[in-house]
Image (cartoon, helix red, strand yellow):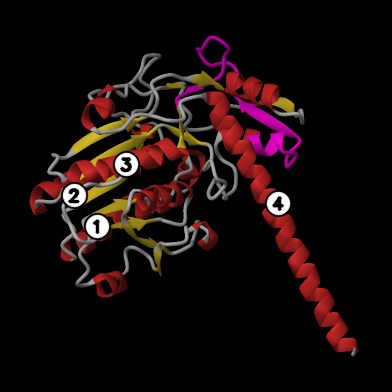
Amino acid sequence: MAHDWETSTAPTVLLTGVAGYIGSHTALAFLEAGWNVIGVDDLSTGSRSAVPEGVEFILADCRSSILQGLLAGRDIAAAVHFAALIRVDQSVSHPIEYFEANLCMVGHFLQSAHALGIPTVVFSSTAAVYGDQGDTAIPESVPAVPTSPYGHSKLAAEWLLSDFCAASGMRHVTLRYFNVAGGDALGRAGPRSDATHLIKIVSEAATGQRASVTINGEDYDTPDGTCVRDYIHVSDLADVHVSAVDYLVRGGESVTLNCGYGRGFSVREVIDRALAITDRPFRVEMGQRRPGDTVFVVADNAKLLQTLDWRPRHDDLDAILRSAIAWEHTLAARRSDEEKALQLVGSSREEQQHS
């Protein structure tokens, strides 16, 4: 959605974690909507090649005081904070690292944003703050009872954000993501890091990068015994961020919103759909439950639809799977090209040595 404000210059948005999966897609969405985009990332988990062309990229930790110096005097309408650690299972064994990255970093960033005069912030949160809420769609009004250090750290960051904005006069939109999946339709972006989410894992199997997919627990209280999740296409989620910033810039009040489609699919359903789509079958194996996993996580997205000028464009599990599989093919082709280029460089060096 392009902005239509009466201004002679395009507005500027600051994205932290721009080299990550959701950050890179959101950068594309802002560029397409006519924004100037400044992207910050320390590349500890992101990839420089994921940052879209057209983004003014700054290699820095968003906690760094250097950032304030680099951005001083810039007219930045809003900031979107993605930078975080996101693995539920990893958070169980490394809680301190997760609180440092997901809570302490937020505090430092908010201080910097306020010092720079940025009036509005969109915060990347998660449905993991809800914990187990039974087998009905979850509204934002239910008490948050996270079951993992990851969820705890994100909920604490939400509290910090709310308190800081109340004290400083800044306004915020907190977006609680459900399961994000898929890739850009033009093949410009997609998940690059080690697989931790089901659709990423299934897509790797569907493209021959792994021989099997493991179902982590088949004894949950669901129709087929496997966990149920609400999958939202990453490009739709990117559009939510553009709409959230637009809402804030137009004077919207601080709000917390679920980001999902409002319907869920079990682990078995996702795997079965992927097997039906791909021409490369893979094994399905059974494993143990993972620590921190919840049974049923589906969004009640009524508040999102009522608050923002946004409607999903990719609400179809098969389409999400196809885009995810297409991205894996794109990644494989790029790796092949890089390997060939390295081989050519090596051959050229050998020829020079023997000439």
Left or right for 278, reference 161: right
Of circles 4 and 3, the one toward us is 3
* Residue drawn 50% across the image and 44% down it: 90
Label 3 – label 2 distance at C-alpha: 12 Å
Q: Secondary structure at mark 4?
A: helix
Q: Which residues are magenta?
A: 203-230
Where the N terminus falls, by quadrant?
A: top left
| Residue 123 visible (yes or no) | yes
The residue where tag 3 is placed is: 1
| Residue 5: mark | 2
Q: Earlier in the sequence, mark 3 or mark 1?
A: 3
Alpha-carbon distance for marks 2 and 1?
A: 9 Å
- Asked if the residue at tag 2 contacts the one at tag 3, i.e. Cβ–Cβ closer than 8 Å, the answer is no
Q: Which amino acid, by three-letter code, is at mark 1? A: Pro
Query: For mark 4, what is the residue?
Result: 333
Relative horizontal placement of residue 143, taking residue 216 as reference (left or right): left
Whether 73 is drawn above or below 43: the answer is below
Q: Secondary structure at mark 3?
A: loop
Q: Which mark is residue 11?
A: 1
Position of the C terminus by quadrant = bottom right
Q: CA distance from mark 3 to mark 1?
A: 14 Å
Q: Residue drawn 63% across and 26% down?
A: 215
Q: Amino acid at mark 2?
A: Trp
CA gap between label 1 and label 4 equals: 36 Å
Query: Which badge, 4 or 3, is on the more N-terminal residue?
Result: 3
Please state which amino acid type lies under the numbered disc 3: Met
